[in-house]
Amino acid sequence: MTIAALIVAAGRGLRAGGGLPKQYRTLKGIPVLARAIRALAAHPDIAEITVVLHPDDEARFEAIIAPHVDGIPLATCHGGKERSDSVAAGLESISGQGADHVLIHDAARPLVDLALISRVIDAMRETGAAAPAMPVTDTLWQGTGGTVSGVVPRERLFRAQTPQGFRLDLIRQAHQMLKDAATDDVSAARAAGHEVTIVEGSARNIKITGPDDFALAENLLGKEMDIRTGNGFDVHAFTEGDHVTLCGVRIAHGRALSGHSDADVAMHAVTDALYGALGAGDIGRWFPPTEAQWKGAASDIFLRHAVEMVTERGFAISNIDCTIICETPKIGPHAQAMRANLAQITGIDADRISVKATTSERLGFTGRKEGIAALATATLVKT
């Protein structure tokens, strides 16, 4: 079974205010649509993701969403006037691409979790059609002229959620058969005569509709803890020179370190640790050594870029630990200056930064004084 995800993001969603369609507004620094994309991309059973956009939103998607989903393979297509038109267009877009099942998700549900997605997939695998829902627990009234005119029994009533999962051929045919617009894909499947299995939804999987929903979503996000840890490792060989630069501190030495930039092996390790915690690759990805503009560049350029990316993605640096491995020069006398420099660049207190050194007991290339290695670990916390 190959599963594609289809995220419907073609609506205008202006009732939520903010001057932008709601899917492009941010929740704790990350756009609603980007959160939905990340949630689905994190599930190991989802092979591909297609986002259905309003034809006028391509530039908006590239400017607002793309920077937050870098590294996630995505396809896009244009939607239609009604939601069901947009879903039909998305289904046509992914047909013939190798997927045989599809999860259809509303961009306005940014807090969907992996456990809920798994429940839908498991039921879809067995029955061909499944959707999450929450039982209605409130008393339901009918009203006439501002007064209660009756009570609706709440037994057997559910609040529908997404993603809704289907065999691709089943839901594609169901949408082709639609005579009128459908409010969701379960409605389309049922209109075509298919049964849909209900799986347990999630109280967190809210749909953002009005301004108050943003406040609720931010409150829910505030209760979750997202901690990321990354590692960085780098090596540079000695060459002719009179100093080395470590963590931005110039240290007089009988040799220099060889590299395309300033060869600050310690700052490179710290930078890669930050990139690693974000799942954003390494320095070479963002500053290729094949590009002449980075020849001899100060490594704080790389570190500042990584710090900016941490902030843009809604994280804060909790701590940094860097170990420099060498026989010479002596690191101890310069460790505090290194910590202070890293603190200035990263914007965190120096007491959250450790810089220390060790030797390799005269073993290996560092033991033979052929170069310096550095290992760093960084921890990020969602803000």
Image (spheres, rainbow, N blue to C red):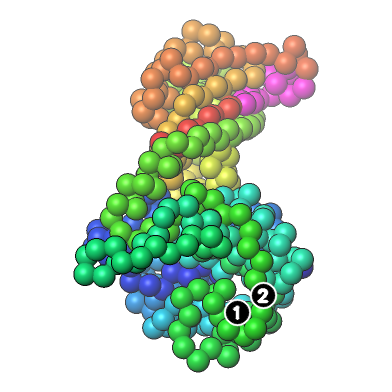
Q: Which residue is mark 2?
A: 195
Indicate left or right for 43 with 62 as reference: right
Q: Which residue is mark 1?
A: 190
Is residue 300 within the magenta segment?
no
Which residues, given as a range, are shown in magenta?
Answer: 364-375
Please indicate, yes or no, whether residue 21 appears anywhere in the rendered image: no
Camera-nearest residue between 306 and 241:
306
Q: How far from the left and from the top, in percent, is residue 82?
A: 41, 81
Q: How far from the left and from the top, in percent, is residue 372?
A: 63, 24
CA gap, disc 2 and disc 1: 6 Å
Would you place residue 55 above or below residue 210 in this image? below
> Image point 41% across, 37% down: which residue?
222
The kind of residue tagged 1 is Arg
Indicate left or right for 373 with 218 as reference: right
* Cβ atoms under marks 2 and 1 closer than 8 Å: yes
Camera-nearest residue between 104 and 150:
150
**Picture quadrant of residue 78:** bottom left
The kind of residue tagged 2 is Glu
